[in-house]
Image (cartoon, rainbow, N blue to C red):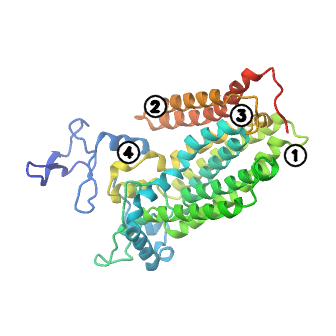
Amino acid sequence: EGFRNITLLKKDGGGKVKLQPLCQRGCQSRQKCTLRHQMPLYNKQMTLETPKALQVRSLLGVRNLRVVKESKIEKIGITVTSLTPRNTTEALFHVGFQFSDYEDFFEMVNKTFDPEHMIDILFPVMSIIDSVFAAQLLLCLAFGGWLNAVMKWWFLEERPYWWVRETTFYTSASRPVLRQTLQTCETGPGSPSGHTSTAAMMIILSLMWISHVMYDRRQCHMWWWKTVVYPLCGAALVSVILARIYIATHFPHQCLIGALVGSFVAPALCIYISDPFIWKYGSHATYETSRAVAWHVLGAVAMIVIAGLTYLGLLWCGLDPQWTIKLAFRWCENPEAIRVSTTPMYALVHATGSLLGWALCVTPAVAEYRHYTKNRSIIISIFITVTTLVGFQHLQDNICKSDALKYYASLFVMSAIKPMLLLRVNPAVAMWPFRGSKTKND
């Protein structure tokens, strides 16, 4: 342990890899001792501590990469042998190698349905078209991201790519080798799958939006649209499930749980929260807007408290909330590909910040900027949206990453401010040149 026998991989002139001593016990300077801890061996290779890896470890709060023993995993009650029998692992092995020709397609699917990318890219694009649709999308993605992260800490399930290396279910001779890609190195617990949950929510929302355009507004009615759209939605969801299994980040049951969660969350949030509030019907017909906003803010704060209590509850039970991060660093074949955004902590900060921003800025006034509104400038809206995204990306790239608390606090503030700019400021400026005209109503 500590700084004993620290070594660094280095290639000699002939291309062979040799071990070079780096420092001995007692080394105090990081400049003299790049590796702070001895990394566990896997595949007879050594993990390299580059500046990027050190930065990621700093944000993750991981100081010691020694991984919990299997006895520790058994101690916290994870019976992976009962959840993942031999035929399930064989299915993972089969998908990983039989679909190797579709690796580029699966990579594209994983990137497309990344929950973080949905909030950072799809939500701004939707805000250009329709503020009500954008508000529904943000609420579903933010609440779904929060629920997914909290449930991961509740279930504490393994991911295939490290479980297959840690479990005693296999002997050394029969242990399968799962295919890994650069997208495999995710650090949170495995269940439920955030990607399949996001995909299910997007499918439900897309069907609701298309149905609204086809029937409610009678603008582009085509009787055959269900025949085309429904099979495409089913194929998209199956593709996401196969993509997650292909890169060995989820077991099949974890993907199915994620899909079920997303399928229930999206319609429930739209039917019982966003739509009655924006259109002021049902219980919101006589409800003051300021009072409803206060309740929404209180709900966002309650979600932050629940997440904090979950984290403290794990510590109180003697469990390390970051044990999966250590397993990821140990068994990922490409530790350089580990991203902070795959951790439950990042997802919680990002989601709760977005929820607070939604609660503060979404009012019935967002219904003034719809896809059928004529008195607006799409060019101005696009310009403001692009400027906002570039500005926020610049700020995020320059956040202090040496201090995890400052980093997450800055991320929370930016996540809360962005919805206000895209859902209120952007529409107001886009409609400003037409302020003297009468806005088209229903």
Question: Of label 4 and label 3, which has the lower sequence position?
Answer: 4
Question: Of label 1 and label 3, which has the lower sequence position?
Answer: 1
Q: CA distance from mark 2 to mark 4?
A: 16 Å
- Pointer 1: what residue? 281
Disc on res. 130: none
| Amino acid on which disc 4 is placed | Arg
SS label for mark 4? helix
- Marks 1 and 2: in contact by CB < 8 Å? no
Residue 52 placed where, x, y %? 34, 41
Disc on res. 57: 4
Q: Residues within 10 Å of mark 1 (few under 14, many from 20)?
A: few
Image height check: is 59 above or below 164? Answer: above
Residue 151 placed where, x, y %? 59, 58
- Pointer 3: what residue? 361
| Amino acid on which disc 1 is placed | Tyr
Q: CA distance from mark 4 to mark 3?
A: 35 Å
Residue at image location 68% in from the left, 34% down from the top: 423
SS label for mark 2? loop
In this orientation, does residue 186 appear?
A: yes
- Marks 4 and 1: in contact by CB < 8 Å? no
- Pointer 2: what residue? 399
SS label for mark 3? helix
- Marks 3 and 2: in contact by CB < 8 Å? no
Q: Residues within 10 Å of mark 4 (few under 14, many from 20)?
A: many
Which quarter of the figure has residue 198?
bottom right
| Amino acid on which disc 2 is placed | Ile
Q: Residues within 10 Å of mark 2 (few under 14, many from 20)?
A: some
> In this image, 330 relative to 203: left or right?
left
